[in-house]
């Protein structure tokens, strides 16, 4: 095969790849990063860290934020395989065990998500100036809507925005992702959680309503 034939085949392959629409994807199975979140229609803002283990279906979120003039600290371990999560208070060595709705997690693009568009964050003029991303949207339970942005290469989550009549708007931005987890203890409940009993609720919390419910509790205590 001569050089011209090789170039022709390569051109055909690149054209075929470029013509394919982006497909829903799944983030790498082990990740750690940081995030900012605003919810409660802007009432609550916070910053924190997150560790994600798709193999064990567990997420650890450490969150620090403000509700009005009050501040709060929140440490949560979510175990999706058991449909429970723990709210951990290290100042009191106490632990609450609650039901977790596992129908949606933000570390993947749902199969029924619809592509809104593709764009570069930054610039495509030169290597290193931007990143190609896909924006997806879809429906949530209880008449909710969401949109989410993932990188085209690597399927790294960047932003998540959702609206539900019950909780209003939630906006999450993530950054500083690294692949892998450094501390396996992140996914094991502290020893003082062993005696915690599951609280009975009519509707299990999602990953986001769990964050908001604790913040609203802080607001009521002002």
Image (cartoon, grey):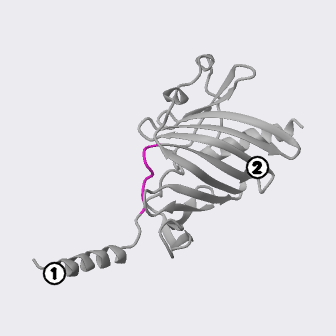
Badge 1 is on which residue? 5
Say what secondary structure mark 1 lies in.
Answer: helix
Q: Give left or right: position of 43 versus 145.
A: right
User: Would you say 50 lies left or right of 13 here?
Assistant: right
Residue sitting nearer the eye, 57 or 2: 2
Question: Crowdedness of circle 1 by 10 Å Cα count: few (<14), some, many (20+)?
Answer: few
Residue occupying image coordinates x 61% and y 27%: 198
Mark 2 or mark 1, which is nearer the start of the sequence? 1
Q: Which residues are magenta?
A: 24-30
- In the rendered view, would you say 9 is above or below 47? below
The mark lying in front, picked from 1 and 2, is 1
Q: Is residue 43 covered in magenta?
A: no
The residue sitting at 60% across, 58% down in the picture is 159
Q: What type of secondary structure mainly makes up the magenta span?
A: loop
Q: Quadrant of the N terminus?
A: bottom left
Q: What x and y, as percent, mark residue 167?
A: 72, 53
Q: Judge the density around disc 2: few (<14), some (14-19), many (≥20) Cα neighbours within 10 Å.
A: many
Look at the numbered disc 2 and give the secondary structure of its residue. Answer: strand
> Is 65 displayed left or right of 96 in the figure?
right
- Residue 204 visible within the image: no
Residue found at the far left of this picture: 1
Tell me: 144 left or right of 79: right
Q: Position of residue 81 (x, y in %)?
A: 46, 36
* In this view, 28 is above or below 169: above
Asked if labels 2 and 1 touch by Cβ distance under 8 angstroms, the answer is: no
- Residue 120 shows in the view: yes
Residue that numbered label 2 is attached to: 45
Q: Residue 222 placed where, x, y %? A: 90, 37
């Amino acid at each position: 095969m001569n050089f011209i034939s090789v170039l022709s085949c390569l051109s055909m392959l690149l054209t075929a790849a470029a013509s394919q629409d982006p497909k829903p994807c799944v983030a790498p199975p082990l990740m750690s990063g940081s995030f900012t979140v605003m919810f409660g229609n802007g009432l609550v803002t916070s910053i924190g860290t997150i560790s994600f283990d798709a193999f064990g279906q567990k997420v650890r979120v450490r969150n620090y934020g403000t509700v009005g003039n009050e501040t709060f600290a929140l440490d949560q371990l979510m175990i999706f395989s058991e449909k429970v999560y723990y709210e951990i208070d290290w100042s009191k060595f106490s632990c609450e065990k609650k039901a977790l709705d596992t129908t949606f997690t933000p570390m993947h693009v749902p199969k029924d998500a619809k592509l809104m568009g593709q764009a570069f964050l930054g610039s495509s003029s030169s290597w290193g100036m931007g990143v190609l991303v896909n924006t997806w949207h879809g429906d949530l339970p209880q008449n909710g809507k969401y949109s989410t942005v993932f990188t085209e290469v690597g399927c790294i989550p960047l932003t998540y925005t959702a609206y539900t009549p019950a909780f209003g708007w939630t906006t999450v931005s993530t950054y500083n992702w690294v692949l892998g987890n450094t501390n396996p203890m992140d996914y094991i409940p502290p020893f003082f959680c062993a005696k915690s009993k599951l609280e009975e609720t009519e509707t299990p919390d999602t990953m986001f309503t769990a964050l908001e419910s604790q913040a609203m509790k802080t607001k009521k205590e002002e």
